Image (tube, rainbow, N blue to C red):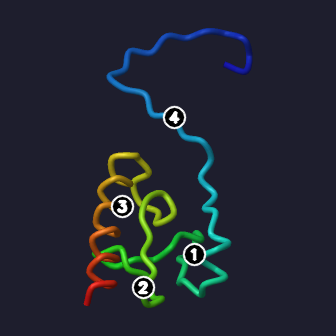
Amino acid sequence: LRDGKEEDYKTDAVFVAIGDDPSNELAKELGVALDDGGYIITDKKQATNVDGVYSAGDITGGVKQWIVACGEGAVAAISAYDYLNL
């Protein structure tokens, strides 16, 4: 703790967060729609408002955990594949 004291807490898990300002510069350049927090807006297939552009993970807001990002990434990859092979 900042005051130099130590405390013990019984927990089942600890989640570490490293900041949460979205790095959305490329999305802005492409014209991708962002929400009020600066996160990319996607549909259920991880598609953005820009044709052929997909997004996944922390940049889309919501739950910021790697397992969620992995799932969204898989959906985005399949959606991009389908888009390219229409």
Q: Amino acid at mark 2?
A: Gly
Q: Nearer the viewer, residue 37 or 84?
A: 84
User: Residue 29 at what x, y percent from top left?
Assistant: 66, 82
| Residue to which mark 1 is pinned | 36
The answer to which of marks 2 and 1 sits earlier in the sequence is 1
Mark 4 highlights which residue? 16
How far across and how far down the image is residue 76, in percent? 34, 69
Mark 3 or mark 2, which has the lower sequence index?
2
In the displayed structure image, the side of residue 13 where residue 6 appears, left or right: right
Label 3 Cα crowd, 10 Å radius (few <14 / some 14-19 / many 20+): some
* Residue drawn at 53 percent across, 77 percent down: 35
The answer to whether the residues at label 1 and label 4 have Cβ atoms under 8 Å apart is no
Quarter of the rendering occupied by the N terminus: top right
- Give whichever of discs 1 and 4 has the lower sequence position: 4
Choose the circle earlier in sequence order: 4 or 3. Answer: 4
State the CA–CA distance, disc 4 to disc 3: 21 Å
Label 2 element class: loop
Q: Is residue 7 above or below residue 21?
A: above
Could you tell me if the residues under marks 3 and 2 are in contact, i.e. CB atoms within 8 Å? Answer: no
The CA distance from mark 2 to mark 1 is 23 Å
Kindly state the secondary structure of the residue where label 1 is placed: loop
For residue 86, what is the image quadrant? bottom left
Depth check: give the residue in front, 8 or 51. Answer: 51
Could you classify mark 4 by the number of other residues whose Cα lies within 10 Å: few (under 14), some (14-19), or many (20 or more)?
Answer: few
Name above or below for residue 65 compared with residue 37: above
Circle 1 Cα neighbour tier, 10 Å, few/some/many (<14 / 14–19 / ≥20) = few
Q: Contact, CB < 8 Å: mark 3 with mark 1?
A: no
Which circle marks residue 73 in the picture? Answer: 3
Q: Which residue corresponds to mark 2?
A: 52
